[in-house]
Image (cartoon, rainbow, N blue to C red):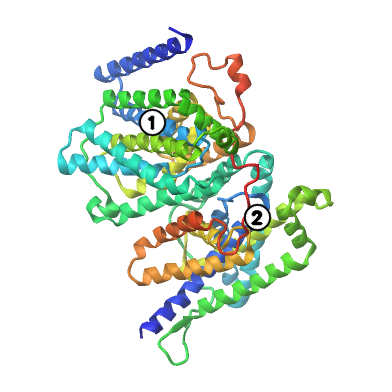
Amino acid sequence: MNKLNKKFWLSIVLALVLYGVVQILLTTGALNDVYKSMFLLICVNVMLAVSLNLINGITGQFSIGHAGFMSVGAYVSAILTLDYDVPFVLTIIIGGLVAAVCGVLIGMPTLRLNGDYLAIATLGFGEIIRIIMLNTEYVGGASGLSGIPAKSTWTIMFFFTLITVVVINNFIRSTHGRACIAIRENEIAAEAMGINTTLYKIIAFTLGALFAGMAGGLSAHTFYVITPGSFNFLKSFEILVMVVLGGLGSTAGSIVGAVFVTLLYTYLRDFPEWRMIIYSIVLILMMIFRPGGLLGRTGFSLKKFGKKEAKANGGISDSSAS
Amino acid sequence: MAMEYFIQQLINGISVGSIYALIALGYTMVYGIIKLINFAHGDVFMVGSFIGLFSAKYLASAGLPPVLVLIISLIFSMTISALLGITIERLAYKPLRKSTRIAALITAIGVSFLLEYTGVLVLGPQAQGFPDILAKKQYQLFGTSIQVESNQVMILITTIILMIILQYIVRYTKTGKAMRAVSFDMEAARLMGINVDRTISATFAIGSALAAAAGVIFGMTYNSVDPLMGVMPGLKAFVAAVLGGIGSIPGALVGGLLLGTVETEISSLGYSSWRDGVAFAVLILILIFKPSGLFGKNVREKV
């Protein structure tokens, strides 16, 4: 067994231990409902952050419409549960797949754009999805869907999150992931090396949308109610904060960012405006003083401050700067 | 009758469009010069509106004549917002001049949310009433049923005056020439002895002042301002700037007016809840089929 595999299995074991500990604490009632929903929210946010990181951090395509995909997954899975009695896990998967189809449809035209134009186009699509939900009577219009059964348990949440992290992390390490990183570093050079840049951008976008959709479905089955208003630009911004905070391009960073933002969210629940002010100040200071994020561009490794990674820490890069 | 209705909506559209155009100018000028989508611009518009509100209330209670109240609060709001624009540029964007465009974009989004939620914290989330500075009157146009409000006339006059001043500054003053030079080639301009930092500050100042003017006009038209009011007009003004060709001043004007009329016509057809969606659909279509916009230059990608 080589070193990479050993590290991989070690992290899986550690994750399972974490799962077990939380599960025991929850079943014995040592943690109350506030903490329970906090742990569920952490899982949702980790899925969102890791999937956005694949698009923004790894492939270097700046998307700020992630909440749109989340809402597609949330609505599809909620309708399947409410109107068609589809088994729970299946609704989540179908929700993710529909979001992925939206990802392909949105990605094909927009991924020809780069840099800030792409950002604006994804923002536009996110808003259009929200406005479509708002105007569709079948999904409840502005008041949204309510009475969604809370079927997301810690076990289901955790394993969906684990699958997300493992799949995306292994994707990043594969040939295809390397191609995505090449696109981030220099799109023109990558194309010259024979990488089908459009294809890989769409693959990354679709994969990101798939997991965002699943996260949406899971969150819909946690919080009873979904409204178009809860998937607005603010939500996309929150996901972006998680990714940027942890370090664009680092899966471990995205997880740390997601956990941090969720804690901030839980403890500043009664002061929403302070929360937003802290987010934005953190974001600005981060970009000015530490554009690589808290962890920089390290991979999902246990010795995060190893020499090799420290050297590889760079600022985020932008393919459109020529 | 249908024709009159159409023209009526067109007139309403032009006044909404003027507001978009004034905001879009700031986007397009800043983008032209440092290639940054200044997300915080819509929130400068909000700040300008609130400053206009406070100064108008204060001046009206001091017993000044309405026209004077309008002019003084407009100038006051524009000045303070210009200073705000310069401060934002100095503190948040200048340290990032050398870093990537995405880093600058993320910072701009951060500044935008900072302004919005500082506003919510200080002013409270609820909307506040904007006083009627000028008495509202309605005029009939040439004996037809088409109505023009005094406010719409005021908006058009203010917009035209500001446009003329802007054209003068950009075409004939030293600052304007420096701005055009810097947007053409920053490094070459620096080598020619142009103070690039000062020119960028001037661009932010002018753009923010125009946004503040739009904010005061917006307040007078809709009589209601709140700390999050800048989000949608800001995004739509950006759409207008892209529509007209980002970096082009006449483009921003035409794009704003065009978007304003399209939106009003769509609302008048009874699809007002789809209005925002249409603006974004327009944006995406423009980006896909003609990213340089109506008046923009085509820029070839360099290796």
The label number, if any, that marks residue A238 in the structure image: none
The number of discs equals 2
Q: Quadrant of the C terminus of chain B?
A: top right
User: Foreground: B33 or B150?
Assistant: B33
Residue A30: quadrant of the picture:
top left
Judging by the rendered image, the residue that carries numbered circle 2 is: B32
Answer with left or right where residue A9 lies relative to residue B84. left
| Residues indicated by labels 2 and 1 sit on the same polypeptide chain | no
Quadrant of the snapshot with the N terminus of chain B: bottom left
Q: Residues within 10 Å of mark 1 (few under 14, many from 20)?
A: many
Q: Which residue bears the numbered disc 1?
A: A47
- Label 2 element class: helix
Quarter of the rendering containing residue A31: top left
Residue A268 in view here:
no
Q: Position of residue B136 (x, y in %)?
A: 48, 79
Q: CA distance from mark 2 to mark 1?
A: 37 Å
Q: Secondary structure at mark 1?
A: helix
Q: Residue at x 49, y 69 (%)?
A: B16
Q: Is residue B25 left or right of residue B10?
A: right
Mark 2 or 1: in front is 2
Q: Amino acid at mark 2?
A: Gly
Splitting the image into 4 quarters, where does residue B208 fall?
bottom right
Placement of B220 over or under A102, stated as above or below: below
Amino acid bearing label 1: Met
